[in-house]
Amino acid sequence: MDITKFIPLWIIYLSDMKFFIDTANLDQIREAHDLGVLDGVTTNPSLMAKEGIKGTENQYKHYVEICNIVNGDVSAEVISTDYDGMVREGEELAALNEHIVVKLPCTADGIRAVKYFAGKGIRTNCTLVFSIGQALLAAKAGATYVSPFVGRLDDISEDGTGLIRDIVEMYNYYGYNTMVLAASIRHTRHIIDCLKAGADVATCPLAAIKGLLNHPLTDSGLARFLEDYHRVNG
Ligand code: G3P
């Protein structure tokens, strides 16, 4: 039975696809924010290392700096792989700022920690998801977001956006509230395909978001408008 037909259309229209930028680079975050379409940020240990941010204190300061730029959710990932460590780290991260979303890997300890934080009202992003089974466990544990890695599946000839479509269909069928946050987006086409697959969020490199602006007919149309204007108006 397709339960979506019982959802009033105005609820569906109220939702929109959110854009998060997938970086810890403050300049790129500022540029994306100034574009006026940024809804949040995702980071991970590799992206933080890429910015050379060393030590817990500096990392926590950096997360707060990101939160101060973006009036939206900011995913900060734990380093611990054991449940107790995840809980301790996650509570520290969540206490930094109201926008912090605790990012946890889709492992047994990670799912257990998602469940714990769901009970505490602390929002989570279950990451490193590569199958519909993992997405099911994340939703059952009460994850706020689930992050299927589209690009990394494509890299091994699997269907990254096909997984997005399957998860969206499963969540809609069972009525799970977990939001599908398409991650490992490599280019603009990935955004379009994830949009069509029904993703709630796409977390992207800035270039992929800006790529949505590009169309030769926009450029040629604007040039023609200006040419016609100046031919008459000088
Ligand atoms: O948020 C996950 C994302 O940063 C992974 O992207 O390109 O390393 O697969 P990528």
Image (cartoon, rainbow, N blue to C red):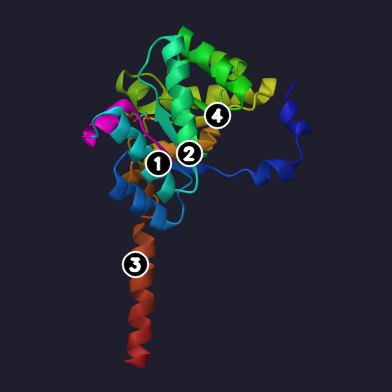
- The secondary element bearing badge 3 is classed as helix
- The secondary element bearing badge 2 is classed as loop
Q: Is residue 106 above or below residue 184?
A: above
In the image, 161 versus 90, the foreground residue is 90
Q: Which mark is residue 220?
A: 3
State which mark lies toward you, 3 or 1.
1
> Which of marks 2 and 1 precedes in the sequence?
1
In the image, 45 versus 173, the foreground residue is 45
Dot 4, crowdedness within 10 Å: few (<14), some or many (≥20)?
Answer: many
> Which of marks 3 and 4 precedes in the sequence?
4
Q: Is residue 96 above or below residue 162?
A: below
Left or right of 40: which side holds 175? Answer: right
Asked whether the beta carbons under mark 4 and mark 3 sit within 8 Å of each other, the answer is: no
Part of the protein shown in magenta: 41-52
> Which of marks 1 and 3 precedes in the sequence?
1
Asked whether the beta carbons under mark 1 and mark 2 sit within 8 Å of each other, the answer is: yes
Q: Residue at x 38, y 38 (%)?
A: 63
For mark 1, what is the residue?
64
Q: Residue at x 34, y 65 (%)?
A: 219
Left or right of 232: which side holds 106? Answer: right
Disc 1 to disc 2, C-alpha distance: 7 Å
Instruction: Residue 74 in the image: state x and y as whole percent.
Output: 45, 38
Instruction: Residue 182 in the image: state x and y as whole percent.
Output: 45, 31
For mark 4, what is the residue?
123
Asked whether the beta carbons under mark 4 and mark 1 sit within 8 Å of each other, the answer is: no
Dot 2, crowdedness within 10 Å: few (<14), some or many (≥20)?
Answer: some
Disc 4 to disc 3, C-alpha distance: 45 Å
Instruction: Residue 22 in the image: state x and y as whole percent.
Output: 36, 37
Disc 4 to disc 1, C-alpha distance: 16 Å
For mark 2, what is the residue?
97
